[in-house]
C-alpha cells in the first residue's frame, strides 16, 4: 500500500510504498519507478508548487527530482547529489513555506 502520495498540476503522482519504493504515475498509469543508487528506502514524497519532487529516505537523505518532460534527474543547487540532514533519521513529510522546504 502507499504510505505517502503527492501530485503535481501536470497529472503526475508520486507514491512511496510501505516497502520504501517510489513510483511515478501519470493519468492513472504507472510511468516508472525511481530507484536510489544505494537501494535506500524512501519514506515520503512531495511535489512543490513548481512540480519539483522531493523524496525523503529512511536514512535522512532528501533527493530532489525534476520530472518535467519525463526527464528525471537529481539536483540541489546545481549539484547532482542528494544532501544529508545529519540530525534527521527518518523523514516523514515536507512542508513548503515561501520557497523553502522543511523536512
Image: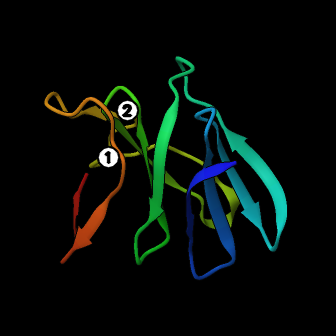
Q: In this rendered view, identify the residue nearer to me: 9 or 2.
A: 2
Question: Dot 1: what SS?
Answer: loop
Q: In this rendered view, identify the residue nearer to me: 38 or 89.
A: 89
**CB of mark 1 within 8 Å of CB of mark 2?**
yes
Q: Residue at x 56, y 28 (%)?
A: 36
Q: CA distance from mark 1 to mark 2?
A: 7 Å
Would residue 88 be found to the left or right of residue 72 on screen? left
Query: Would you name the residue on which mark 2 appears?
Result: 81
Q: Disc number at residue 76?
A: 1
Would residue 9 be found to the left or right of residue 58 on screen? right
Q: Position of residue 20 (x, y in %)?
A: 58, 34
Would residue 1 be found to the left or right of residue 102 on screen? right
Q: Position of residue 75 (x, y in %)?
A: 40, 45
Q: How many marks?
A: 2
Q: Position of residue 93 (x, y in %)?
A: 35, 54
Q: Is residue 91 above or below residue 103?
A: above
Q: Which of the 4 quarters of the picture holds residue 90?
A: top left
Amino acid at each position: 500500500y502507499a504510505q505517502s502520495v503527492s501530485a503535481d498540476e501536470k497529472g503526475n503522482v508520486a507514491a512511496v510504498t510501505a516497502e520504501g519504493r517510489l513510483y511515478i504515475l501519470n493519468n492513472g498509469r504507472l510511468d516508472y519507478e525511481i530507484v536510489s543508487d544505494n537501494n535506500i528506502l524512501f519514506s515520503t514524497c512531495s511535489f512543490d508548487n513548481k512540480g519539483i519532487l522531493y523524496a525523503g529516505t529512511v536514512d535522512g537523505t532528501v533527493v530532489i527530482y525534476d520530472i518535467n518532460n519525463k526527464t528525471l534527474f537529481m539536483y540541489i543547487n546545481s549539484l547532482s547529489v542528494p544532501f544529508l540532514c545529519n540530525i534527521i533519521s527518518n523523514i516523514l513529510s515536507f512542508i513548503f513555506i515561501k520557497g523553502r522546504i522543511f523536512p
